[in-house]
Amino acid sequence: MKIRKNIPLIDQHDKYGFWGGKFGGNYVPETLKKPIEDLASNFSKLRKNKSFTKKKNYYFKNYVGAPTRFIKLNNLSRNLNGAQIWAKVVSDANGGAHKIYNAVVHALICKYMGKKYIVGDTGAGYAGKMLSMAAKKFGLKCKIFMGAKDIKRQKPNCDAIRKNGAEIVPVFTGSQTLVDAVSECMRYWVSNCDTTHMCVGSTVGPNIFVKICGYSTSQISKELKFQLINTFKKIPKKIKLINCVGGGSSAYGFWSEFIDYPKSQIELIGVEAGGPKNSKLHAAPLTHNAKLGILHGAASYVCQNKEGQIKETDSISAGLDYPGVSPIHCFLKDTRRARYTSVTDEDALKAYKIVRKFENLNPSLEPSHAFAEAIKIAPKLSKDTIIIVNSCGDAIKDRDILKKFNL
Ligand SMILES: Cc1ncc(COP(=O)(O)O)c(C=O)c1O
Protein backbone atom coordinates (compact mmCIF):
# COMPACT_ATOMS: atom_id res chain seq x y z
CA MET A 1 0.00 0.00 0.00
CA LYS A 2 1.61 3.22 -1.16
CA ILE A 3 0.70 6.88 -1.59
CA ARG A 4 1.44 8.15 -5.09
CA LYS A 5 3.03 11.58 -5.52
CA ASN A 6 1.50 14.56 -7.33
CA ILE A 7 -2.02 13.13 -7.33
CA PRO A 8 -4.62 14.40 -4.86
CA LEU A 9 -5.31 11.67 -2.32
CA ILE A 10 -9.03 11.88 -3.08
CA ASP A 11 -8.22 10.53 -6.56
CA GLN A 12 -5.94 7.71 -5.47
CA HIS A 13 -8.64 5.04 -5.36
CA ASP A 14 -9.03 2.12 -7.72
CA LYS A 15 -11.81 1.76 -10.29
CA TYR A 16 -14.11 0.25 -7.67
CA GLY A 17 -13.66 3.25 -5.37
CA PHE A 18 -11.20 1.76 -2.85
CA TRP A 19 -8.15 3.47 -1.40
CA GLY A 20 -5.26 1.09 -0.77
CA GLY A 21 -7.43 -1.69 -2.24
CA LYS A 22 -9.61 -1.95 0.86
CA PHE A 23 -10.92 1.36 2.22
CA GLY A 24 -13.98 3.13 0.80
CA GLY A 25 -15.99 1.66 -2.05
CA ASN A 26 -19.72 1.91 -2.63
CA TYR A 27 -21.78 -0.37 -0.41
CA VAL A 28 -25.13 1.03 -1.47
CA PRO A 29 -28.57 -0.34 -2.28
CA GLU A 30 -29.33 -0.97 -5.96
CA THR A 31 -31.63 2.10 -6.12
CA LEU A 32 -28.73 4.43 -5.28
CA LYS A 33 -26.35 3.07 -7.92
CA LYS A 34 -27.66 5.32 -10.68
CA PRO A 35 -27.94 8.55 -8.61
CA ILE A 36 -24.40 7.96 -7.35
CA GLU A 37 -23.09 7.36 -10.85
CA ASP A 38 -24.84 10.54 -12.05
CA LEU A 39 -23.36 12.54 -9.20
CA ALA A 40 -19.87 11.13 -9.83
CA SER A 41 -20.03 11.89 -13.52
CA ASN A 42 -21.34 15.44 -12.93
CA PHE A 43 -18.69 16.12 -10.32
CA SER A 44 -15.95 14.82 -12.58
CA LYS A 45 -17.10 17.22 -15.34
CA LEU A 46 -17.57 20.17 -12.99
CA ARG A 47 -14.09 19.88 -11.50
CA LYS A 48 -12.64 20.38 -14.95
CA ASN A 49 -15.08 23.12 -15.87
CA LYS A 50 -13.44 26.56 -15.67
CA SER A 51 -16.64 28.45 -15.03
CA PHE A 52 -17.57 26.11 -12.13
CA THR A 53 -14.11 26.53 -10.59
CA LYS A 54 -14.36 30.29 -11.00
CA LYS A 55 -17.77 30.32 -9.35
CA LYS A 56 -16.57 28.11 -6.47
CA ASN A 57 -13.53 30.34 -5.91
CA TYR A 58 -15.74 33.43 -6.07
CA TYR A 59 -18.02 32.11 -3.31
CA PHE A 60 -15.09 30.86 -1.23
CA LYS A 61 -13.62 34.36 -1.29
CA ASN A 62 -16.74 36.52 -1.17
CA TYR A 63 -19.15 34.38 0.81
CA VAL A 64 -17.02 32.05 2.94
CA GLY A 65 -14.41 34.74 3.52
CA ALA A 66 -11.27 32.88 2.38
CA PRO A 67 -8.46 33.03 3.28
CA THR A 68 -8.89 32.49 6.99
CA ARG A 69 -6.12 33.75 9.29
CA PHE A 70 -2.81 32.03 10.02
CA ILE A 71 -1.53 33.41 13.31
CA LYS A 72 1.18 32.77 15.86
CA LEU A 73 -0.06 32.10 19.38
CA ASN A 74 2.71 34.03 21.09
CA ASN A 75 1.52 33.82 24.69
CA LEU A 76 0.76 30.13 24.51
CA SER A 77 4.13 29.44 22.85
CA ARG A 78 5.99 31.43 25.50
CA ASN A 79 4.24 29.63 28.32
CA LEU A 80 4.86 26.17 26.90
CA ASN A 81 8.49 27.10 26.29
CA GLY A 82 9.17 24.70 23.44
CA ALA A 83 7.87 24.52 19.89
CA GLN A 84 6.12 27.56 18.44
CA ILE A 85 2.36 27.20 18.34
CA TRP A 86 0.46 28.64 15.40
CA ALA A 87 -3.19 28.39 14.46
CA LYS A 88 -5.02 28.31 11.17
CA VAL A 89 -8.18 30.07 12.27
CA VAL A 90 -10.65 28.26 10.06
CA SER A 91 -13.43 29.26 12.47
CA ASP A 92 -13.12 32.70 10.84
CA ALA A 93 -15.03 31.25 7.89
CA ASN A 94 -18.63 32.38 7.47
CA GLY A 95 -20.76 30.39 9.95
CA GLY A 96 -17.80 29.54 12.20
CA ALA A 97 -16.34 26.27 10.87
CA HIS A 98 -14.83 24.43 7.90
CA LYS A 99 -18.14 22.74 7.05
CA ILE A 100 -19.06 25.75 4.93
CA TYR A 101 -16.66 24.69 2.13
CA ASN A 102 -18.36 21.34 1.58
CA ALA A 103 -21.82 22.89 1.92
CA VAL A 104 -21.17 25.56 -0.74
CA VAL A 105 -19.76 23.02 -3.21
CA HIS A 106 -22.71 20.66 -2.68
CA ALA A 107 -25.20 23.49 -3.12
CA LEU A 108 -23.50 24.50 -6.38
CA ILE A 109 -23.56 20.89 -7.62
CA CYS A 110 -27.22 20.57 -6.60
CA LYS A 111 -28.11 23.70 -8.62
CA TYR A 112 -26.10 22.46 -11.58
CA MET A 113 -27.93 19.13 -11.50
CA GLY A 114 -31.26 20.97 -11.52
CA LYS A 115 -32.44 19.71 -8.13
CA LYS A 116 -34.39 21.99 -5.81
CA TYR A 117 -34.10 20.04 -2.58
CA ILE A 118 -31.00 19.32 -0.54
CA VAL A 119 -30.61 17.15 2.56
CA GLY A 120 -27.72 16.60 4.93
CA ASP A 121 -26.61 15.14 8.25
CA THR A 122 -25.09 16.92 11.20
CA GLY A 123 -23.56 16.11 14.58
CA ALA A 124 -22.14 19.28 16.10
CA GLY A 125 -24.67 21.20 14.06
CA TYR A 126 -22.08 23.00 11.95
CA ALA A 127 -22.54 20.81 8.84
CA GLY A 128 -26.28 21.42 9.17
CA LYS A 129 -25.96 25.12 9.84
CA MET A 130 -23.65 25.56 6.85
CA LEU A 131 -25.88 23.53 4.54
CA SER A 132 -28.87 25.60 5.61
CA MET A 133 -26.84 28.76 4.90
CA ALA A 134 -25.79 27.55 1.45
CA ALA A 135 -29.36 26.41 0.70
CA LYS A 136 -30.68 29.85 1.61
CA LYS A 137 -27.99 31.54 -0.45
CA PHE A 138 -28.74 29.46 -3.56
CA GLY A 139 -32.52 29.16 -3.17
CA LEU A 140 -32.78 25.47 -2.25
CA LYS A 141 -35.17 23.76 0.16
CA CYS A 142 -33.23 22.08 2.93
CA LYS A 143 -33.76 19.30 5.51
CA ILE A 144 -31.17 18.48 8.16
CA PHE A 145 -31.06 15.12 9.96
CA MET A 146 -29.74 15.39 13.50
CA GLY A 147 -29.64 13.02 16.48
CA ALA A 148 -31.95 13.99 19.34
CA LYS A 149 -29.02 13.99 21.79
CA ASP A 150 -27.10 16.42 19.57
CA ILE A 151 -30.16 18.68 19.16
CA LYS A 152 -30.12 19.12 22.93
CA ARG A 153 -26.39 19.75 23.30
CA GLN A 154 -25.81 22.00 20.26
CA LYS A 155 -28.74 24.40 20.59
CA PRO A 156 -27.14 27.54 19.10
CA ASN A 157 -26.47 25.74 15.81
CA CYS A 158 -30.00 24.31 15.77
CA ASP A 159 -31.42 27.80 16.22
CA ALA A 160 -29.31 28.98 13.27
CA ILE A 161 -30.49 26.09 11.06
CA ARG A 162 -34.12 26.96 11.75
CA LYS A 163 -33.52 30.68 11.25
CA ASN A 164 -32.12 29.88 7.83
CA GLY A 165 -35.45 28.32 6.95
CA ALA A 166 -34.33 24.68 7.00
CA GLU A 167 -36.20 21.87 8.71
CA ILE A 168 -34.46 19.80 11.38
CA VAL A 169 -35.52 16.15 11.33
CA PRO A 170 -34.79 14.73 14.80
CA VAL A 171 -33.42 11.19 14.84
CA PHE A 172 -34.44 9.11 17.84
CA THR A 173 -32.88 5.79 16.87
CA GLY A 174 -29.67 4.26 18.30
CA SER A 175 -27.44 6.60 20.24
CA GLN A 176 -29.30 9.63 18.79
CA THR A 177 -26.02 11.10 17.54
CA LEU A 178 -24.24 11.67 14.23
CA VAL A 179 -24.03 8.00 13.23
CA ASP A 180 -27.82 7.72 13.38
CA ALA A 181 -28.32 11.06 11.64
CA VAL A 182 -26.19 9.94 8.66
CA SER A 183 -28.06 6.61 8.45
CA GLU A 184 -31.44 8.34 8.51
CA CYS A 185 -30.38 10.93 5.95
CA MET A 186 -29.16 8.20 3.59
CA ARG A 187 -32.41 6.29 4.08
CA TYR A 188 -34.37 9.42 3.15
CA TRP A 189 -32.22 9.94 0.07
CA VAL A 190 -32.92 6.39 -1.17
CA SER A 191 -36.61 7.28 -1.48
CA ASN A 192 -36.16 10.86 -2.73
CA CYS A 193 -33.06 10.83 -4.91
CA ASP A 194 -34.94 11.82 -8.08
CA THR A 195 -35.68 15.31 -6.77
CA THR A 196 -33.21 15.69 -3.94
CA HIS A 197 -29.46 16.04 -3.63
CA MET A 198 -27.68 14.66 -0.56
CA CYS A 199 -24.70 16.28 1.11
CA VAL A 200 -22.65 14.06 3.42
CA GLY A 201 -21.13 16.33 6.05
CA SER A 202 -17.66 14.76 6.19
CA THR A 203 -15.19 12.71 4.14
CA VAL A 204 -17.25 9.59 4.75
CA GLY A 205 -19.93 7.67 2.88
CA PRO A 206 -19.81 6.19 -0.62
CA ASN A 207 -16.69 7.11 -2.63
CA ILE A 208 -18.07 10.19 -4.39
CA PHE A 209 -19.03 11.89 -1.13
CA VAL A 210 -15.52 11.41 0.25
CA LYS A 211 -14.16 12.99 -2.92
CA ILE A 212 -16.48 16.00 -3.01
CA CYS A 213 -15.88 16.78 0.65
CA GLY A 214 -12.09 16.40 0.36
CA TYR A 215 -12.06 18.52 -2.78
CA SER A 216 -13.95 21.25 -0.89
CA THR A 217 -11.95 21.32 2.34
CA SER A 218 -8.58 21.16 0.54
CA GLN A 219 -9.02 24.94 0.29
CA ILE A 220 -7.65 25.09 3.87
CA SER A 221 -4.22 23.66 3.04
CA LYS A 222 -4.02 25.59 -0.24
CA GLU A 223 -4.32 28.77 1.80
CA LEU A 224 -1.93 27.53 4.46
CA LYS A 225 0.78 26.64 1.94
CA PHE A 226 0.62 30.14 0.55
CA GLN A 227 0.63 31.66 4.04
CA LEU A 228 3.63 29.57 5.12
CA ILE A 229 5.66 30.74 2.13
CA ASN A 230 4.56 34.32 2.73
CA THR A 231 5.53 34.16 6.40
CA PHE A 232 8.74 32.08 6.29
CA LYS A 233 9.80 32.64 2.61
CA LYS A 234 9.77 28.84 2.17
CA ILE A 235 8.13 25.80 3.73
CA PRO A 236 9.92 25.41 7.09
CA LYS A 237 11.97 22.30 7.94
CA LYS A 238 10.10 21.13 11.02
CA ILE A 239 6.33 21.36 10.97
CA LYS A 240 3.63 19.44 12.81
CA LEU A 241 0.08 19.81 11.53
CA ILE A 242 -2.36 18.84 14.28
CA ASN A 243 -6.04 18.36 13.54
CA CYS A 244 -8.98 16.73 15.29
CA VAL A 245 -10.56 13.80 13.45
CA GLY A 246 -14.24 12.89 13.51
CA GLY A 247 -15.12 11.80 10.00
CA GLY A 248 -11.90 13.51 8.96
CA SER A 249 -12.89 16.35 6.62
CA SER A 250 -11.05 19.18 8.35
CA ALA A 251 -7.93 17.03 8.81
CA TYR A 252 -7.87 16.00 5.16
CA GLY A 253 -8.43 19.62 4.09
CA PHE A 254 -5.66 20.82 6.39
CA TRP A 255 -3.17 18.20 5.19
CA SER A 256 -3.94 17.59 1.52
CA GLU A 257 -1.31 19.95 0.08
CA PHE A 258 1.38 18.57 2.39
CA ILE A 259 0.98 14.81 2.02
CA ASP A 260 3.83 14.56 -0.53
CA TYR A 261 6.34 16.22 1.83
CA PRO A 262 8.60 13.89 3.83
CA LYS A 263 7.25 12.92 7.22
CA SER A 264 10.49 14.17 8.78
CA GLN A 265 9.65 17.66 7.51
CA ILE A 266 5.88 17.76 7.92
CA GLU A 267 4.34 15.42 10.44
CA LEU A 268 0.58 14.91 10.23
CA ILE A 269 -1.08 14.26 13.59
CA GLY A 270 -4.75 13.35 13.84
CA VAL A 271 -6.51 13.56 17.20
CA GLU A 272 -9.61 11.49 17.84
CA ALA A 273 -12.09 11.69 20.70
CA GLY A 274 -10.88 9.61 23.65
CA GLY A 275 -14.20 10.04 25.48
CA PRO A 276 -14.60 10.40 29.24
CA LYS A 277 -11.63 9.40 31.39
CA ASN A 278 -12.06 5.98 33.02
CA SER A 279 -14.74 5.01 30.53
CA LYS A 280 -14.46 2.27 27.94
CA LEU A 281 -16.44 4.39 25.49
CA HIS A 282 -14.60 6.56 22.99
CA ALA A 283 -14.85 7.59 19.34
CA ALA A 284 -11.31 6.77 18.30
CA PRO A 285 -11.28 3.86 15.82
CA LEU A 286 -7.80 4.66 14.45
CA THR A 287 -6.12 5.09 17.83
CA HIS A 288 -7.67 1.89 19.17
CA ASN A 289 -6.90 -0.21 16.07
CA ALA A 290 -10.56 -0.90 15.34
CA LYS A 291 -11.27 -3.58 12.76
CA LEU A 292 -12.34 -2.97 9.19
CA GLY A 293 -16.12 -2.73 8.86
CA ILE A 294 -18.80 -1.30 6.63
CA LEU A 295 -20.53 1.87 7.73
CA HIS A 296 -22.55 4.35 5.69
CA GLY A 297 -21.71 2.81 2.35
CA ALA A 298 -17.95 2.48 2.79
CA ALA A 299 -15.32 0.20 4.30
CA SER A 300 -13.21 1.78 7.01
CA TYR A 301 -11.95 1.14 10.51
CA VAL A 302 -15.07 1.15 12.68
CA CYS A 303 -15.64 0.80 16.42
CA GLN A 304 -17.49 -2.53 16.56
CA ASN A 305 -18.10 -5.51 18.81
CA LYS A 306 -17.00 -9.09 18.07
CA GLU A 307 -20.11 -9.67 15.96
CA GLY A 308 -19.38 -6.62 13.83
CA GLN A 309 -22.19 -4.54 15.35
CA ILE A 310 -21.38 -0.83 15.52
CA LYS A 311 -20.34 0.04 19.08
CA GLU A 312 -21.72 2.91 21.07
CA THR A 313 -19.34 5.88 21.26
CA ASP A 314 -19.06 8.75 23.70
CA SER A 315 -17.44 12.14 23.49
CA ILE A 316 -18.12 15.56 24.93
CA SER A 317 -17.64 16.80 21.38
CA ALA A 318 -20.64 16.04 19.17
CA GLY A 319 -18.58 16.58 16.01
CA LEU A 320 -16.10 13.83 16.92
CA ASP A 321 -18.67 11.43 18.38
CA TYR A 322 -18.70 9.00 15.44
CA PRO A 323 -17.70 5.30 15.37
CA GLY A 324 -16.21 5.34 11.85
CA VAL A 325 -13.70 7.47 10.02
CA SER A 326 -12.88 8.45 6.47
CA PRO A 327 -11.35 5.74 4.24
CA ILE A 328 -8.71 8.34 3.41
CA HIS A 329 -7.56 8.45 7.03
CA CYS A 330 -7.47 4.64 7.17
CA PHE A 331 -5.18 4.79 4.14
CA LEU A 332 -3.01 7.50 5.75
CA LYS A 333 -2.76 5.38 8.89
CA ASP A 334 -1.83 2.15 7.13
CA THR A 335 0.77 3.89 4.93
CA ARG A 336 2.07 5.50 8.15
CA ARG A 337 1.95 8.94 6.56
CA ALA A 338 -0.15 10.22 9.46
CA ARG A 339 -0.06 9.42 13.15
CA TYR A 340 -3.29 9.18 15.11
CA THR A 341 -3.86 9.57 18.81
CA SER A 342 -6.76 10.43 21.10
CA VAL A 343 -7.51 12.95 23.83
CA THR A 344 -10.06 12.55 26.63
CA ASP A 345 -12.98 14.89 27.30
CA GLU A 346 -11.20 16.16 30.41
CA ASP A 347 -7.99 16.98 28.55
CA ALA A 348 -9.88 18.71 25.74
CA LEU A 349 -11.64 20.89 28.32
CA LYS A 350 -8.31 21.65 30.01
CA ALA A 351 -6.82 22.62 26.65
CA TYR A 352 -9.80 24.87 25.93
CA LYS A 353 -9.23 26.62 29.25
CA ILE A 354 -5.52 27.10 28.56
CA VAL A 355 -6.07 28.48 25.05
CA ARG A 356 -8.73 30.87 26.37
CA LYS A 357 -6.41 31.98 29.17
CA PHE A 358 -3.52 32.90 26.90
CA GLU A 359 -5.06 33.76 23.54
CA ASN A 360 -7.90 35.63 21.97
CA LEU A 361 -9.26 32.45 20.41
CA ASN A 362 -12.38 30.44 21.18
CA PRO A 363 -11.88 26.92 19.75
CA SER A 364 -14.88 24.61 19.90
CA LEU A 365 -14.57 21.27 21.69
CA GLU A 366 -13.46 19.50 18.47
CA PRO A 367 -10.28 21.56 17.84
CA SER A 368 -9.73 21.71 21.61
CA HIS A 369 -8.80 18.03 21.24
CA ALA A 370 -6.09 19.06 18.76
CA PHE A 371 -4.89 21.85 21.05
CA ALA A 372 -4.57 19.31 23.88
CA GLU A 373 -2.10 17.28 21.82
CA ALA A 374 -0.20 20.45 20.84
CA ILE A 375 0.03 21.51 24.50
CA LYS A 376 1.26 18.03 25.43
CA ILE A 377 4.07 17.76 22.87
CA ALA A 378 5.21 21.39 22.50
CA PRO A 379 7.37 21.59 25.67
CA LYS A 380 9.45 18.60 24.48
CA LEU A 381 10.20 20.13 21.08
CA SER A 382 12.79 22.62 19.85
CA LYS A 383 11.94 26.31 19.39
CA ASP A 384 12.35 26.05 15.62
CA THR A 385 9.58 23.43 15.42
CA ILE A 386 6.35 24.90 14.14
CA ILE A 387 3.17 23.31 15.43
CA ILE A 388 0.09 24.41 13.54
CA VAL A 389 -3.33 23.59 14.93
CA ASN A 390 -6.40 23.78 12.77
CA SER A 391 -8.79 25.78 14.92
CA CYS A 392 -11.66 24.59 12.77
CA GLY A 393 -14.68 25.57 14.84
CA ASP A 394 -15.94 28.29 17.15
CA ALA A 395 -17.08 27.37 20.67
CA ILE A 396 -20.20 29.52 20.56
CA LYS A 397 -22.08 26.31 19.79
CA ASP A 398 -20.66 24.68 22.95
CA ARG A 399 -21.97 27.45 25.21
CA ASP A 400 -24.28 25.18 27.24
CA ILE A 401 -21.69 22.42 27.74
CA LEU A 402 -18.94 24.85 28.74
CA LYS A 403 -21.24 26.56 31.21
CA LYS A 404 -21.59 23.27 33.11
CA PHE A 405 -17.82 23.36 33.69
CA ASN A 406 -17.85 27.07 34.58
CA LEU A 407 -15.97 27.87 31.38
C1 LIG B 1 -15.89 22.32 14.38
C2 LIG B 1 -15.81 20.89 13.99
N1 LIG B 1 -14.60 20.32 13.93
C3 LIG B 1 -14.45 19.02 13.59
C4 LIG B 1 -15.55 18.23 13.29
C5 LIG B 1 -15.33 16.81 12.96
O1 LIG B 1 -15.62 16.51 11.63
P1 LIG B 1 -14.47 16.29 10.59
O2 LIG B 1 -13.55 15.27 11.16
O3 LIG B 1 -15.18 15.83 9.39
O4 LIG B 1 -13.78 17.58 10.38
C6 LIG B 1 -16.83 18.79 13.33
C7 LIG B 1 -18.00 18.00 12.99
O5 LIG B 1 -19.11 18.38 13.14
C8 LIG B 1 -16.96 20.15 13.67
O6 LIG B 1 -18.15 20.76 13.72
Image (spheres, rainbow, N blue to C red):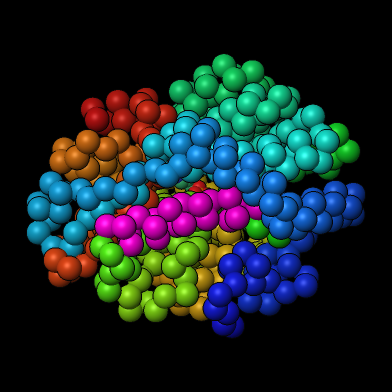
Residue 329 in view here: yes
Question: Residue 101 is drawn in which quadrant?
Answer: top right
Magenta-colored stretch includes residue 140: no
Please state the horizontal and vertical placement of residue 398, each as a whole percent of the image: 38, 31
Q: Is residue 87 placed above or below 140 in the rendered structure?
A: below
Eyeballing the image, is 271 above or below 196?
Answer: below
Residue 68 image-quadrant placement: top left
Q: Residue at x 39, y 79 (%)?
A: 262
Question: Would residue 213 be counted in the magenta stretch?
Answer: yes
Query: Residue at the location (19% across, 40% down)?
Result: 359
Q: Could you say where residue 149 lies in the image, as x and y percent from the top left?
A: 53, 31
Look at 63% across and 46% down and name the residue there. Answer: 54
Of residues 203 and 135, the one drawn nearer to the viewer in this rendering? 135
Helix, strand or loop for the magenta stretch, by majority: helix
Q: Quadrant of the C terminus?
A: top left
Which span is picked out in magenta? 212-231
Quadrant holding the N terminus = bottom right
Q: Is residue 208 left or right of residue 384?
A: right
* Residue sitting nearer the eye, 240 or 292: 240
